[in-house]
Amino acid sequence: MRLRSTALAAVAAALAVSAVPAAVPTAGATASAATASSPGGPAGGAPGDVVGSAPSAFHPLPGQPTNTRAWKIHYRSTTADGIPNVVSGTVIVPQDGRTGPRPLITYAVGTVGLGDSCAPSENLPHGTAMEANLIQQLTLRGWAVVVTDYEGLGTPGVHTYTVGPSAGHAVLDAARAAQRLPGTGLSPTGPVGIMGYSQGGQASSWAAELQGSYAPELQVKGTATGGVPADLLEVAGFNNGSYGSGLIFMAAAGQDAAFPELKLDSYLNPAGRLLVAGMKENCVAIDAIAGSFKRISDLTTRDPLAQPDWRARLDQSRLGRTAPAAPVYQYHALGDELIPYGVGRRLRSDWCGRGANLEFDTVWVGEHVSGVITHSLAAGNWLADRFAGRPTHANC
């Protein structure tokens, strides 16, 4: 089923209502989460194995019915350095009586924050999750959706925000876990789509690059990815001192969580330590405001991004070195004020140069946040074409 652009205004209005800071779960929600099967340690299983699950719910807005069944899961995955870990997420399956293989979307959300209360799995049951209305557009097509929380978001440790390989592993292993979870009706050989924007664009793009080597058994039909921060060093330079500068310090905390040898704290002055400590406990609305219009030099005693070890780790998250095995739909807003349009164009050029089957779409009107809204239906329709076996329209 193709959802037409006439529904766009309704989608945008619904998203605007949902785009509020993620709520701290209620005491009842916390108690419910505690009934989940106890997640096991990282050893003794394969990536994508489910180590804990519990009934959950999916509400785009508080109390809004969706005719779906949902589970919160903990599943095995892999860090950026190849070490086994456990990640949480949410599996959502429409209850529409469908028979035959049901497509599965492994969905990577954009930036929600570093605090555990920001995790999608903590907010999807309450109707307080950002992007929930966009996820509903997928379930209305009859597709199952699995939403990863990413490494360290809702599980022990600090969220490894912007660490590309870790996020890519989490996205792919979420699909494996959803297909292995009893009761979903999903087949391990069913069709899979990958989708994400902004931070989710980085994660989905990394999943696309890694899939051929890391999860070749997944029947990935395509990846829809937008607003991709493909080069973190360039994005950091672009946002330094602007209203997007808080994302730089969130990213620094995420990189330091993945690679403790970077010793972020040793670079921060007292104001920087206070800011980063607060960011680790809060969600994106607070973090972005607290960190806005600050320069790296305002909060550090020396610039970590000038150091070889930091530059090497950030370069490890750069995209474009491997052509995705499955087709890609990539879109980017010309007026993106957070992720420069040139970064997206360069990723397109890199992928095309490596032989990717890529369709690139410029969002001519709007900016970063509006890009995910205005092109959500186009991205969904593109994936619908892949599931239907229709030919692609690559424009390299």
Image (cartoon, grey):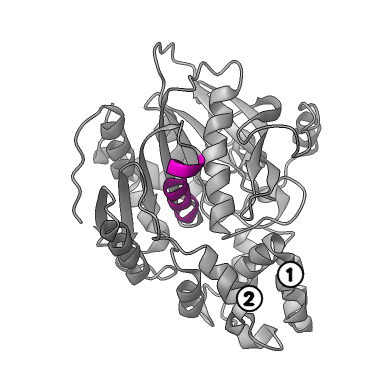
Earlier along the polypeptide chain: callout 2 or callout 1? Answer: 1
The answer to which quarter of the image holds residue 285 is bottom right
> Would you call the spot at circle 2 few (<14 residues within 10 Å), some (14-19), or many (20 or more)?
few
On the image, numbered disc 1 is attached to which residue? 261
Residue 92 image point, x, y percent: 54, 28
* Left or right of 335 on screen, residue 38: right
Quarter that holds the N terminus: top left
Instruction: Name the foreground residue: 34 vs 216.
Output: 216
Look at the image and give the residue range highlighted in magenta: 201-214
Residue 332 image point, x, y percent: 33, 60
The answer to which quarter of the image holds residue 45 is top right
Instruction: Say if 189 sits above or below 324 in the image.
Output: above
Residue at the (50%, 74%) spot, across then down = 233
Instruction: Say if 56 sits above or below 367 in the image.
Output: above
Residue 137: mark: none
Instruction: Say if 388 sits above or below 268 in the image.
Output: above
Q: Are marks 2 and 1 in contact (CB under 8 Å)?
A: yes
